Amino acid sequence: MRSRQCCDGRIRREYILEEPLTRETFVSLSRLTTVTFNEKAPVPLVTFSLDGIEAKAVLRSSMLTVWLDPSAAPECETALFTLLAEAGPMANPTNTMTIIPTDPPSS
């Protein structure tokens, strides 16, 4: 996970997920929040937001970029990954979501 402080005060985090995010995952997610698909763009982009969270991903990619309200970041992250785990193909109990750090471990 990469984490940066934005100039507007929010925290920007990038995650690499174990599985690519599929259209079906986002369609399932759209039952719970507003999801915007931009499949006509050269790179098919998906965005969604939830209380204190704004997220963006390229369809069929395992990279997820999230902007969090710093006052509620831990709760927002928990809610985000619970939400994604319950959506679409990730709802399969044998399919766990693993966050793979993108930064090298510090010594």
Image (cartoon, rainbow, N blue to C red):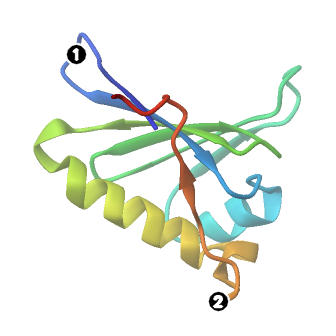
Q: What element carries label 2?
A: loop
Q: Which amino acid does label 1 sit on?
A: Asp
Along the polypeptide, which appears first: circle 2 or circle 1?
A: 1
Towards the viewer: 46 or 7: 7
Camera-side residue of 42 and 81: 81
* Mark in the foreground, 2 or 1: 2
**Residue visible at 70% across and 87% down in the picture:** 94
Q: In this view, does 93 lie to the left or right of 107?
A: right
Could you say where residue 69 lies in the image, as x and y percent from the top left?
22, 38
**Disc 2/disc 1 C-alpha distance (Å):** 38 Å
Residue under the image location 71 percent in, 45 percent down: 62
Residue on which the image places disc 1: 8
Q: In this view, does 49 lie to the left or right of 28?
A: left
User: Which numbered tag is attached to residue 92?
Assistant: none
SS class of the residue under badge 1?
loop
Mark 2 nearby-residue class (10 Å; few <14, some 14–19, many ≥20): few
Residue drawn at point x = 60 percent, y = 51 percent: 35
The image shows residue 75, relative to residue 55, as above or below, that is below
**Is 96 situated left or right of 13 in this image?**
right
On the image, the x and y values in percent for residue 6 come to 29, 16
Asked if residue 55 lies left or right of residue 26, the reply is left
Number of marks = 2
Farthest residue, direction front: 107
Residue sitting at the far left: 71
Residue at position x 64%, y 89% in the image:
93
Q: Vertical placement of 45 versus 100: above or below? A: above
Find residue 107 and report its horizontal and vertical position in percent: 33, 28
According to the picture, the residue beneath numbered tag 2 turns out to be: 93
> Type of residue at label 2?
Pro
Judged from this view, the residue extending furthest toward the top is 7
Q: How crowded is mark 1: few (under 14 residues within 10 Å), some or many (20 or more)?
A: few
Q: Position of residue 12 (x, y in %)?
A: 37, 28
